[in-house]
């Protein structure tokens, strides 16, 4: 094997890849891994790999944030358009509800609404409007009510009850979630 090695290629493969130096040496057919280890230490390949990964992570996060922002902006545009459409429909419906026509009933001329809105129509409209709304906050509440009938309850029983109702260190947090899920 030739004594000259392309350390720049090895360095680039190591920094941008996931392989260890030992795997890199094996892949390139080196008989002695120590020369590559010496080169890697002298040129700080591990530090460069860490910097490369941090930079890649930062770019990925920036792209994800941009994508999320575009999605949120599009959602707002769709909601805004839907609200404008609903507003226009309300305006048209209001104008139509005020229109009347003259009809003959029981030999007498009466005015009746041109458009009739039934309770079912109104319920459907309200349902559509409510689908546009998001719940601002979902709240879960839990409570424990204890009623003691006995007049003879000792301190130890109260302490056991208090200990039972407190969140455990590895179990539930004070807010009701587990210690691991961040609630």
Image (spheres, grey):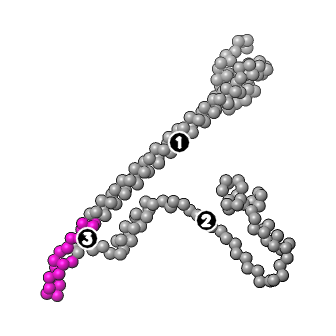
* Nearer mark to the viewer, of 1 and 2: 2
- Measure the C-alpha gap from mark 1 to mark 2: 30 Å
Q: How many marks?
A: 3
Return the x and y of residue 133 as percentages of the image width and height: 45, 60
Q: Secondary structure at mark 3?
A: helix
The residue at which mark 1 appears reads as 65
> For residue 33: magenta?
no
The N terminus is located in which quarter? top right
Q: Secondary structure at mark 2?
A: loop
User: Residue sitting at 26 percent across and 63 percent down?
Assistant: 92
The C terminus is located in which quarter? bottom right
Looking at the picture, tell me which residue is in the foreground, 96 or 26.
96
The residue at which mark 3 appears reads as 97
Return the x and y of residue 20 as percentages of the image width and height: 73, 29
Q: Which mark is residue 140?
A: 2
Can residue 141 be seen from the camera position used here?
yes
Left-right relation of 148 to 182: right
State whether residue 65 is above or below residue 11.
below
Crowding near the residue tagged with mark 3, few <14, some 14–19, many ≥20 C-alpha atoms within 10 Å: some
Residue farthest top in this picture: 3
Q: Are marks 3 and 2 in contact (CB under 8 Å)?
A: no
Can residue 36 be seen from the camera position used here?
no
User: Residue sitting at 67 percent across and 53 percent down?
Assistant: 182
Q: Which residues are magenta?
A: 93-112
Return the x and y of residue 67 as percentages of the image width and height: 49, 42
Looking at the picture, tell me which residue is in the foreground, 22 or 31.
22
Left-right relation of 28 to 97: right
Looking at the picture, tell me which residue is in the foreground, 176 or 40.
176
State whether residue 53 is above or below residue 157.
above
User: Residue sitting at 21 percent across and 70 percent down?
Assistant: 99
């Amino acid at each position: 094997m030739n004594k000259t090695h392309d350390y720049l290629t090895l360095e680039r493969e190591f920094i941008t890849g996931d392989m260890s130096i030992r795997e890199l040496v094996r892949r390139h057919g080196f008989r002695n891994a120590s020369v590559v280890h010496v080169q890697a230490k002298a040129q700080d390949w591990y530090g460069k790999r860490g910097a490369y990964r941090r930079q890649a992570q930062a770019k990925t996060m920036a792209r994800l944030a941009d994508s999320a922002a575009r999605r949120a902006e599009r959602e707002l545009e769709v909601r805004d358009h839907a609200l404008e459409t609903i507003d226009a429909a309300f305006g048209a419906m209001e104008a139509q509800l005020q229109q009347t026509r003259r009809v003959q009933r029981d030999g007498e001329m009466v005015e009746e609404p041109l458009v009739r809105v039934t309770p079912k129509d109104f319920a459907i409209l309200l349902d559509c409007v409510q689908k546009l709304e998001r719940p601002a906050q979902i709240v879960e509440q839990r409570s424990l009510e204890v009623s003691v009938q006995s007049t003879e309850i000792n301190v130890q029983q109260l302490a056991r009850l208090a200990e039972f109702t407190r969140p455990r260190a590895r179990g539930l947090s004070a807010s009701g979630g587990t210690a691991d899920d961040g609630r």
